[in-house]
């Protein structure tokens, strides 16, 4: 996550949690006049459209007061879904044995993209099995990580 996304996460998490949800992650996509702030919320009971609307209303009011983002943007609130992104290191252990696609900020052993089975977390490294080779990938270098659907 970017520094801005970390700040937004810290600002918005208490409001989302007060509504009974976990703030799974945030994305801020700068796209000129069409920028998007996307929040992913999670709950043990699942996430319904009405939940997203309630969170959007409360978070929107907070954003109007705090103004952490200058300029226009669209606020979207969603469930992370089954092919969810992984935003924080503590989210990884819950998905050991699942297939994950990782993209790094800079090359590791000559490559930036990895797709394999998540084996676990060791200290600050993600353990990923790719084609019978186990990689320890530094979490701090992860640009994006997402579960993949296996059918």
Image (cartoon, grey):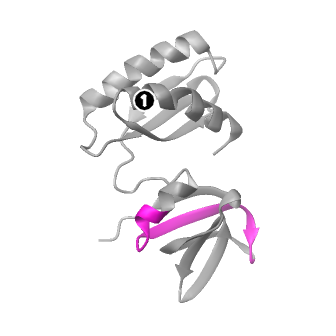
Q: At 42% across and 62% down in the image, what residue appears? A: 94
Residue 72 locus on image (x, y percent): 59, 18
* For residue 137, above or below residue 11: below
- For residue 139, which quarter of the picture? bottom right
Above or below, 41 against 68 in this view is below
Q: Position of residue 21 (x, y in %)?
A: 36, 35
Outermost bottom residue: 132
Label 1: which secondary element: helix
Is residue 74 something one can see in this rendering?
yes
The answer to whether 57 appears left or right of 47 in the picture is right
94 is within the stretch colored magenta: yes
Where residue 30 appears, x then y in whole percent? Answer: 63, 33
**Residue drawn at (70%, 38%), measured in percent from left and top?**
3
Which quadrant, please, contains the C terminus? bottom left
> In the rendered image, which quarter contains the N terminus?
top right
**Horizontal arrangement in the rendering, residue 133 relative to residue 23 (left or right):** right
Quadrant position of residue 58: top left
Which region of the structure is painted magenta? 93-109
Q: Disc 1 marks which residue?
A: 16
């Amino acid at each position: 996550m970017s520094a801005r996304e970390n700040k937004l996460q810290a600002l918005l998490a208490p409001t989302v949690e007060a509504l009974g949800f976990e703030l799974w992650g945030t994305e801020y996509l700068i796209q000129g006049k069409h920028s998007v702030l996307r929040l992913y919320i999670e709950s043990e009971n699942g996430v319904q459209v009405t939940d997203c609307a309630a969170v959007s209303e409360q978070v929107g009011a907070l954003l109007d007061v705090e103004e952490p983002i200058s300029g226009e943007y669209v606020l979207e609130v969603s469930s992370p879904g089954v092919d969810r992104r992984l935003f924080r290191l503590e989210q990884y252990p819950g998905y050991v044995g699942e297939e994950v696609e990782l993209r790094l900020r800079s090359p590791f052993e000559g490559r930036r993209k990895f797709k394999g089975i998540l084996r676990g977390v060791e200290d600050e490294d993600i353990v990923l099995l790719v084609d019978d080779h186990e990689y320890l990938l530094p979490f701090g270098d992860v640009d994006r990580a997402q579960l993949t659907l296996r059918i």
